Image: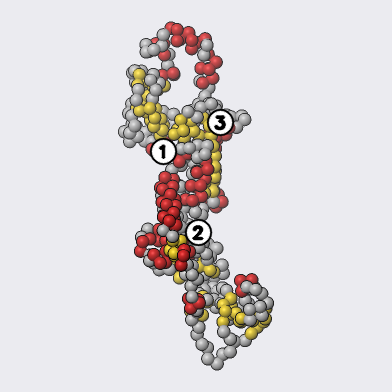
């Protein structure tokens, strides 16, 4: 017997007098399995399909002797002729799982289509664009009962934080089709983790860059020019290329800092098999935890948020983080002492820095990038000296 994958089968209960056994034409009532090819089988075990069934309406019901009297036959022949004739023209839509093309992966998304029975929200399934057009288009090549089915379409993310994007998409689609997640249960379906190219690690050779707190050890020269300070949402620690235990970037084959980022950043998925139901549960649990913290007079710190999310993504226990790092009491929250910001400086005997130019701006963040590593300028606005590290301007004593 032909094997049918589970996702191509629709399970339901048959109505009285709806199906017959194909072999002896005796009536059947009970659970049935409807395949994507339009065949019907008795039972509910797709690994061991029961006897094949046929619809009773395909036979001369008057010859079967169960509930079809001459009066019923006359009623169907005369009063219901237009309806029966129209229903024979309709076809059953075929469930189809459409996979994205290489062009879709390059673009980062593609359109998916589905149909749902108007009298059964749970009977929702994916279809091809052709099937969708045949139901919604003005000139269909195949006829489907528009009173029995309705169709929908949406964009499915293939790049980025696909779990979150596809969850929000299905949540919006559920306003019209409440059980849409039955047809699309896996939020990361068709997601392909990016594979670094060996040539990436030899693409750049940028000398003379330093971290703000270390002007002795250079930043690896093969990191791209866009490698700089990240933020809470975008940083190396939540990038798919980051190896946490080694602080290593698999794309550029170089050691990096978790708080930094580059243009190749891609968020790591919470799980490669994240389902709609599990994702919804995680979101609700996160909301409850935040509410509990507020009731206890605690506010998550930015550092605590970043650490907690990074640990959750990598399957480690968030409770291992000290509570003083995770939360700060609202009534006692104070800015850290100035000593926290002190940077180690290394004296260079016999070398007095040269001031290259003077500027006048109210913030070091509005300064133009330096022309070379070690360049020193004087900002007349705050009367401070700044040194270019290759990434940002650092305040220095001259």
Is residue 307 at least partly visible in the picture? no
Q: Which mark is residue 191?
A: none
Q: Which mark is residue 135?
A: 3
> Which type of secondary structure does the marked residue at label 1 adopt?
helix
Q: Residue at x 53, y 17 (%)?
A: 83
The image position of residue 28, as x and y in percent, is: 35, 21
Q: Earlier in the sequence, mark 3 or mark 2?
A: 3
Q: Residue at x 52, y 45 (%)?
A: 169
Q: Earlier in the sequence, mark 3 or mark 1?
A: 1
The image position of residue 313, as x and y in percent, is: 41, 58
> Which type of secondary structure does the marked residue at label 3 adopt?
helix
> Which type of secondary structure does the marked residue at label 2 adopt?
loop
Side (left or right) of 21 relative to 251: left
In-front residue for pair 302/278: 302
Residue hosting label 2: 266
The image position of residue 67, as x and y in percent, is: 39, 12
Q: Which mark is residue 7?
A: 1
- Residues packed near mark 2 inside 10 Å, few (<14), some (14 to 19) or many (20 plus): many
Q: How many marks?
A: 3
């Amino acid at each position: 017997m032909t094997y049918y994958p589970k996702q191509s089968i629709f399970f339901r209960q048959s109505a009285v007098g709806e199906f017959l056994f194909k072999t002896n034409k005796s009536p059947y009532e009970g659970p049935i399995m409807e395949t994507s090819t339009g065949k019907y089988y008795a039972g509910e075990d797709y690994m061991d399909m029961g006897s094949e069934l046929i619809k009773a309406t395909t036979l001369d019901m008057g010859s079967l002797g169960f509930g079809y009297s001459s009066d019923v036959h006359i009623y169907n022949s005369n009063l219901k002729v237009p309806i029966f004739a129209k229903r024979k023209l309709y076809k059953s839509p075929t469930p189809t799982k459409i996979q994205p093309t290489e062009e879709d992966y390059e673009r980062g998304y593609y359109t998916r289509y589905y149909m749902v029975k108007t009298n059964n929200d749970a009977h929702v399934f994916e279809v091809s664009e052709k099937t969708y057009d045949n139901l919604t288009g003005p000139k269909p090549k195949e006829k489907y009962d528009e009173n029995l089915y309705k169709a929908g379409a949406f964009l499915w993310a293939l790049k980025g934080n696909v779990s979150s994007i596809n969850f929000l998409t299905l949540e919006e689609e559920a306003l019209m089709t409440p059980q849409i997640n039955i047809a699309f249960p896996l939020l990361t379906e068709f997601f392909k983790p990016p594979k670094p190219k060996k040539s990436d690690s030899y693409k750049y050779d940028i000398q003379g860059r330093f971290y703000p707190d270390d002007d002795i050890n250079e930043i690896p020269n093969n990191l791209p020019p866009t490698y700089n300070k990240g933020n809470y949402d975008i940083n190396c620690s939540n990038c798919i290329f980051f190896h946490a235990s080694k602080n290593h970037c698999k794309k550029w084959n170089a050691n990096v800092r978790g708080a930094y980022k580059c243009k190749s950043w891609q968020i790591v998925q919470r799980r490669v098999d994240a389902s709609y139901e599990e994702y919804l549960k995680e979101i609700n649990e996160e909301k409850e935890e935040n509410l509990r913290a507020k009731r206890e007079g605690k506010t998550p710190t930015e550092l605590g948020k970043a650490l907690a999310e990074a640990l959750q993504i990598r399957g480690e226990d968030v409770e291992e983080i000290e509570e003083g790092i995770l939360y700060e009491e609202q009534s006692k929250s104070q800015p850290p002492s100035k000593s926290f910001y002190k940077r180690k400086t290394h004296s260079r005997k016999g070398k007095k820095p040269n001031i290259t130019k003077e500027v006048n701006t109210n913030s070091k963040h509005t300064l133009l990038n330096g022309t070379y590593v070690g360049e020193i300028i004087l900002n007349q606005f705050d009367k401070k000296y700044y040194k270019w590290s290759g990434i940002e301007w650092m305040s220095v004593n001259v």
